[in-house]
Amino acid sequence: MGNRQAVLLHACEEIEKLIGPIVSQSAFFASKPWGFQSDHDFLNSVVCCHTHLLPREVLWRTQQIERMLGRRQKSVGGVYHDRPIDIDILLYDDWHVNEPDLQIPHPLMLQRDFVMCPLLEVLQKNGGM
């Protein structure tokens, strides 16, 4: 919602400030909404960053960035809605986390071309990470 490119760029700036330096980023990918009906298209990007934070701390800071950029509610129980920004943790090295509010690798990423296309671009840039 809003100026999607500006919001994504601002999110990247905040990720670098609050989480760690971005070492690789995909191009921006436009896509249709997934999981709900909307007149607004998505704009997606994947970043790879270095961090000293643990996954739970990364989650807390990404949620802080979402709130800073205007997100007021989270999707619950697979019910999605329009929002200015949605930041997901897709991977964290080779870690596996399975908690109610944090799953790594992201459990739905393989179902979403708008995630996999930019993720593959970043993986290729990093030699498979």
Image (cartoon, rainbow, N blue to C red):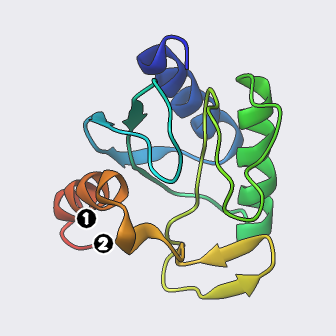
Quarter in which the N terminus is drawn: top right
Query: Label 2, on which residue?
Result: 129
| Residue 28 percent across, percent down from the top left | 30, 33
Q: Nearer the viewer, residue 50 or 95?
A: 95
> In the displayed image of the protein, which residue is found farthest to the front?
37
In whole angstroms, how far apart are the C-alphas of marks 2 and 1?
6 Å
Residue where numbered disc 1 is placed:
123
Residue shown at 45%/44% (left/top)?
Answer: 22
Residue drawn 80% across and 39% down?
A: 64
> For mark 2, does the 10 Å Cα neighbourhood hold few (<14), some (14 to 19), or many (20 or more) residues?
few
Dot 2 falls on a residue whose secondary structure is: loop
In this view, the mark in front (2 or 1): 1
Image location (x, y in percent) of residue 34: 45, 50
Q: Residues within 10 Å of mark 1 (few under 14, many from 20)?
A: some
Label located before the other in sequence (2 or 1): 1
Query: Residues at badges 2 and 1 in contact (C-beta under 8 Å)?
Result: yes
- Mark 1 lies on a secondary structure that is helix
